[in-house]
Amino acid sequence: MATESQNDAQSKSQPVLEPYFPKATEMLFYTGNITPFFKLLTKTSSSVTEQIMEYMSMMLEKMKTKAKADQFKENNYVKLICPPEDNQSNAANGTTTTPPNETEELDRSDLKFSVKIFLRTLEPEILSHTINTIFSELKENYLESVMIALPNYGSLLTLKEFMPLWNVVEDFVNKQKILSAGVCDLMLPLLSDIYDTAQVKPFADQINLGLCCSIPEELSKYVKEHNIQLLTHSDPIDVLNDSDFQQIIREYCHEYDALNWKPCSIVRYSSVIANRGIIKSKGFLVYAKRELNMP
Amino acid sequence: MGLLTQGHPLDWEETKKYAQYIRDHGIEQFLHIYKKLKDRRNDCLKWGDEVEFLMVRFDHENKRAQLVLRAHEILPKLMEPEHENPDDCTTLWRPEYADYMIEGTPGKPYGHLPVHFNMVEANMRLRRQQGQELLGKDEYVLSTSNFPRNGCPNFTWPQHKPTPGTSSSASLFFPDEVIFPDHPRFKTLTRNIRMRRKSKVALNVPIFIDENTPRPFIEDLSVYGDDGGASDSAAVEDHIYLDAMGLGMGCCCLQVTFQAQSIDEARFLYDQLTPLTPIILALSATSPIWRGYLTEIDCRWNVLCAMVDDRTAEERGFEPLKNERFRIPKSRYSSVDCYISPDSAIYNDEEVVQDADVFHKLTENGIDPILAQHIAHLFIRDTLTVFEEKIYLDDTQDTDHFENINSTNWQSMRFKPPPVNSDIGWRVEFRPSELQMTDFENAALVTFIVLLTRAIMTYNLNLLIPISNVDENMQSAQRRDALRTEKFHFRKCLSTKQTPETPCMASVQQPYTQENECEHRLMTINEIINGSNEFVGLLKIIQDYLSNIEVDADTRCTINQYLLLISKRASGKLMTNATWMRHFVTHHPAYKHDSVVSEEIAYDLLWKMTQISNGKEQCPLVLPRMSSKTTLDISAAVETENNQLEVKRSLMNHQNN
C-alpha cells in the first residue's frame, strides 16, 4: 500500500459518523483512462490487485472530499467514476517534451479495444450486465476483443456451467458489438468441448506462462489445428477478493458501507493505436453486489 | 552502406571544387523534400534491422583464421532474388566497405504486430545461412564487430601486402585489395579523406598492459613498410597505431531503423533514443582486440570516428585557422551534437558548429531553428565523392546531393528524410550498437530497443539529459569492462506527467526534482536496466508495456528470453562479448601475458565463436541456456485474426459513417 500523506491520513482517521451509501446493494468503480498515471518511480512491481485497490482508494478519497455529503444516501446502485476531465487536466501540465501522439487526432478506426473480464460468479446475468456497463461507461459502439476469465482459472468448470456465459458473449458477437471473443486459462478437454459446442468459436485462449515457457504439447497442437491464438497473461487466479474489496471501503467510509460486498466482475480494458502498438488508454471497472438485512 | 550511386568518381582536386555546389544543391533538395513531405503521415510504425557479417576462412592445419575476400563474388548471387522479385524477398543484401563484408536486412520491414518480434532472429539466421551456402569449405559467416587481427600481416585470403606508397589509404596495414572492388565509392572515399585531411588518418588505442607486456610498449612499424614517416610522428608508445579507413569501416555493426508516423514523431524518437546510444554501446561491447593486441577499449566507436576523420590540422585545432572555415571539435563520424525537437532545446548545452548561410537559408524557408541547426551542422562537411554523371540534377526530383552530405555524416543517430517519389516516411536510424556473435543476442538487442520506443511513446516518457552528458557517456561506454565498472549520466525521473492532486498518488510519485535539483545522476548500467530502490529500470517499463498488449505465447516466450539476456548482461551475471573474448585470450594456453593475440589464439577464439553461433557449442558465460521460439512463420491463427479483424473493423467504420 502507498505510504500515507498527511491529507490521506486525516481523511482516513477522521471518524465517519454515518454511512455514505446505506441502501446500496450494487456498486461500480470505473477508473477512466489511467495511462497518464503510469507509476515510474518504484522498482517494485505492483500486481493488478494492488493497482486496482490503489485506484479504488483514490476514487473513494475523491468521493469524500468532493462529493456532497448525502449524495449516495438513497442510492441502491452507487457508481464511482473518475471524471474524464480530471484525468486530462492532471495530465496536461508540466511536460518538457510533448510527444507528437499527444496532439494528433485519432478516430475510432485507428484504435483497437481489448477487454478482459474476470468473472467471480457463473451467473450469466452478471456477465451481461458487465458487458453492457462497459459499453455505456466507455461510450463505445463495439469492441474488437473480449476475453472471459473464469473463477479459479476455470478449474472444475463444466461445459454445462460455461455455455450459458458463452451464449451471452455470442449474442454480442452476433450483434457486432464484440468482434472477437476468447477464453482464458482453459485446457483440454474443456477447450475442445467448448470449441465443438459453440456457435461463435473462441479466437484465442489466454494462458499464464509463468517464468518458464513450457506450453503443454497437446494444447499447442490443438490450437494450431483449430486456428486459435495462444496468448499470454500474468494475472493472478483471483484478482480482487471479498475481503480486499471490503477493506478498502472500510478505510475510507463507515463500517456499514463496507459490509457484505462481493466483487462479481472485474474488467481491465485497453485501447491500442492499431498500426503502431502504442497504448492509448487503459482502465479498470469493478462491479460488486451485496445483500443487506434492511430493517 | 551509404549512397551507392553508380558512375565515375572525380579525382580529389576536381571533387574539392564542388564542395559549395553540393552544399547549395543539397540544401535545395532538402527544402524541396521538406516542403513537399513535411505533412506526410504514415499509418504504420515500421522498423527493421541491418546486420553486417564478416566472412572468415579457417586453416585448421596451420591454426590460422583469415578474412576471405569474396563479397564481390557472392553478392551478385545474394542479390538475385531482389532483382527477380523485388517485392517478395525475405532478405536484402548490400555490399559494404571491405570485400570480406556482406550486409543483410529483412526483405520487408517489421510492423506493429507483436509476432514480428518473434521473426527477427529467424530472419537473421536465414541471412547467415544464405551467406553460408555460397561459401566454400572452411569458410564461415561470422558476426562480430571487429576481426581481432584486422590489419595484421596476411590477415586476408587471398593474401595481399600493403603498399603505403601507392594505396588509397597509404596504410602500413590495410591493403587496397581488401576494399570492396566492385563499387568505386569505397576506394574514392578512402583516398579523398586522406587528401582532404592532408595526412593519413591516425588513432592510437591504448594497449592493455599485462604482466609481460614490454614497458614501454613500442611497436617497430618499419617492418610494415615505408609510409614516408607518417607513423613515426603519429604513433605513440603504449598504444596500438591504426592508420586506415578499413580498420574502422571494416568493422561490422548492428543498426535499427524506424519509420515514424510523421516528421514530428521522427524528431521525437531521434531525441529520446540519443541518451540510449551510450547505454546500448556498453551493453553490446564486443571489440577488445585491435590489430592483434588486447587493448583498453571494448568498442569500435572511437576507432571509426578516427579512421574516417577528414578534418585538416586547422579544423582539428592544431594550426591557426587560415584556409578552413571552422574549428571542428569532432570527426564527421561521431556521436550526435544536438537534439532536434523544439522542446529539447534546453538540453543542447554544447556549441554546435554550423554553416551560417545554410542556417539562414533554412530558417528563411520556414524551417524551425532547431532542425535548421541540425542540418546546418551536418553541412559544415565537404563532399568526399562526386560522380561525374550525377552532378547536374533536378533538385525537385533528386536527393543525391543532400544524401551525399547526410550519409557521410556517420553519427550515433541519423535523421532520414523520405526519398522523393516513394511512400516511405520520415525515418530515424539507431547506429551505435556493436554486433554480437549470435543471432539470438542481436535479436535481443533489437527487440529491446524497439520495445523501449513503444513504451516511451505509450507512456510519454522523457529520457533527455544535456547532450554534453551524453557525450561523456559515449566515452565511458567504450572503456574496458565499462558495463561493470563505469557509471553513466541518466535521467532520474522519466515521467513527464504532473501528479494528480490526490494524496494517494502524491505519495507514490514524489516530486523528485525541486527547483534547482539536477534532473539526472550517475547510475550503473545495472541500475539503468534493472532498476533500484530509486529508479524504475528500463526493463520494468518494457514489462509493463507488454502486460497491456496481446502477445501470443511463443512471442512472449521469445521476448522473455531476450529480456532475460539483457537483464543478466546488465547485472554482470553474463559477460559482454568483449569481456568474454578477453577471458578467452587470457586463459588460452598459448597466451604469454604480453597482450599479444597471436594467430593461433585468434584462430581458436574465432572458431569457438563460429561453433557458438551455429549452435554447436554452448557459451554459458555469455548466453543463457534456453533458446527462443523464433520463427519466420506467422501462425495461421494470427494472420487469420488480423485479416478478419481488419475486415470487421472497416465494415464497422463504414456503418458508422
Image (cartoon, helix red, strand yellow):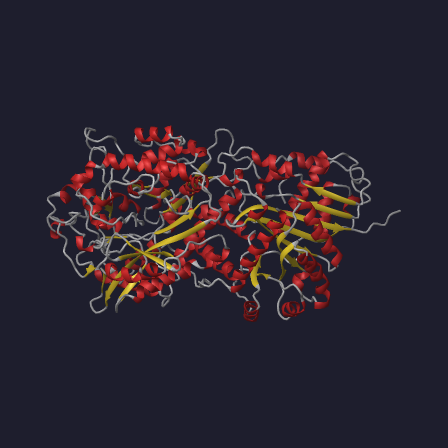
In depth, the one of B59 and B167 nearer the eye is B167
Q: Is residue A24 left or right of residue B310?
A: right
Q: Residue B548, relative to residue A65: is it above or below?
A: below
Q: Is residue B512 left or right of residue A155?
A: left
Give the image location of residue B334, x and y in percent: 31, 41
In depth, the one of A148 and B562 nearer the eye is A148
Give the image location of residue A75, x and y in percent: 80, 42
Could one spot residue B502 in this view of the protein? Answer: no
Q: Is residue B309 left or right of residue B448?
A: left
- Report the residue that reaches farthest toward the right: A295
In depth, the one of A147 and A14 nearer the eye is A147
In depth, the one of A195 and A83 nearer the eye is A195
Q: Which quadrant of the view contains residue B18? A: top left
Q: Is residue B638 left or right of residue A115?
A: left
Give the image location of residue B438, x and y in percent: 37, 60
Q: Residue B14, relative to residue B134: is it above or below?
A: above
Residue positioned 63% across, 45% down in the render:
A1
